[in-house]
Image (tube, rainbow, N blue to C red):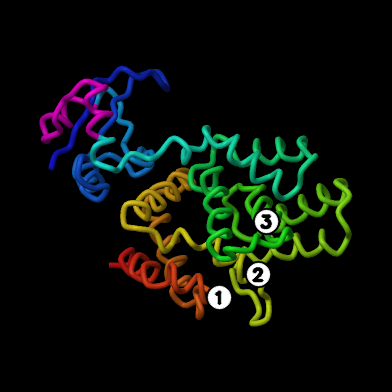
Amino acid sequence: MAIYVDPPLWPAHGTRFSHLISDTSIQELHDFAAAAGIPERAFDGDHYDVAEARYGALVAAGAVPVEGRTLVRKLIASGLRIPARQRSKALKLPLLNRWNDALPAHDALFLDLLDRWGEEHRRYHGRTHLLAVLEALDLLTHPAAPPRPVLLAAWFHDAVYRGIAGEDEEESARLAEDALARAGLPDAEVDEVARLVRLTADHCPGPDDDAGALLSDADLSVLGGAPEAYARYRAAVREDFAHIGDDDFAAGRAAVVRQLLRLDPLFHTSRGRELWLEAARRNLRGELM
C-alpha cells in the first residue's frame, strides 16, 4: 500500500505537472491529497495532477517518487486505472455506433452533440456520462432495445450544460425540439423526447411513465456505483463546479444529496432498484457523514 508520484514533466498552465496515484484505493489517494492540501478539482478519475511546486512537499509527506513508466505500470496493476474507452476524448467511435443505432444518416447532428458533450468546462457531465447513461439503458431493457425516444432523450438531456439547474434541462429540451424537428421526426416523437429531457430536472416520473422511469434510473445509475467509481463521480462533480468556493459547494452538494435521499422511490424500475438502490443509499448517506 503506497502513494506514488512521478517527476513534474507534463507542461500546462505555465508550469509542469506530476501525477499522484495510489496502488491500493481511490479513497487512500483522496485522503493523502486532502492531508497534503491538494484540492479535489485536481483529481482526474484515477490520479491527481499536481503542480511542480508541490512535488518536494509530496515526497516529504510520504509519496514514493518513481518514473512515469513505473507509475503507469503500478496504476494498471492496482486495477484502478480508468480504461481508455471511458475517457471522454476516446469515445467518438463507441458513441457514433450508438448514435447510428438511434438515428442513422444524421451525422451533422451527431457531431454537434458530440462537440457539446466534449466541451472543456465539463468534467462529470461529459461524454463518459453520456455513454454510461446509454449503457445503463441497455441494462434496464435487456434483452430488448431501449425505445428510441428514450435513447434520443439521453443524447439531449445534458446537451446544454452550464451548471444551472432547471435552465440547462429547459435549454436542452428546446435544442431537442428544434434539432429533431429539422431532422424530420414526427411531432409526437419530438414532443416526447423534449418531455423526457425536462423530466431530468427532478427525476420524478409519474407512476405510469415507463419511458420517464427508464431515463431517470439510467441518469441516476452513477449513484449506485462501486466505492472507487463513486469517488470518481464525486470528484468530477466538484470539478464541474470549480468556480464555486469549497464552503458553498459543500452546502449545495449536501442539499442535493438530501434531496436524492428523500426521493421515494429513488429508482423507478424494478431492475434499477435491483441493480443500484442499496449501493446508492450507502453512497449518498456516506457523503453526509
Badge 3 element: helix
Residue at image position (47%, 70%) is 260
Label 2: which residue?
212
Relative vertical location of residue 34 with respect to residue 274 in this rendering, above or below: above
Q: Mark 1 belongs to which amino acid?
A: His
The answer to whether 36 appears left or right of 143 in the picture is left
Badge 1 or badge 3: first in the primary sequence: 3
The first of marks 2 and 1 along the sequence is 2
Q: Could you say which is closer to the camera, residue 156 or residue 100?
A: 100
Which three-letter amino acid code belongs to the residue tagged 2? Gly
Q: Is residue 230 left or right of residue 189?
A: left
Image height check: is 52 above or below 102?
above
The N terminus: image quadrant = top left
Residue under circle 3?
Answer: 151
Give yes or no for residue 58 being in the magenta stretch: yes
State which region is magenta: 54-74
Q: Are the residues flagged by discs 2 and 1 in contact, CB closer than 8 Å?
A: yes
Q: Residue drawn at (55%, 62%), measured in percent from left and top?
A: 218
Give residue 101's mark: none
Residue 250, percent from left and from top: 38, 58
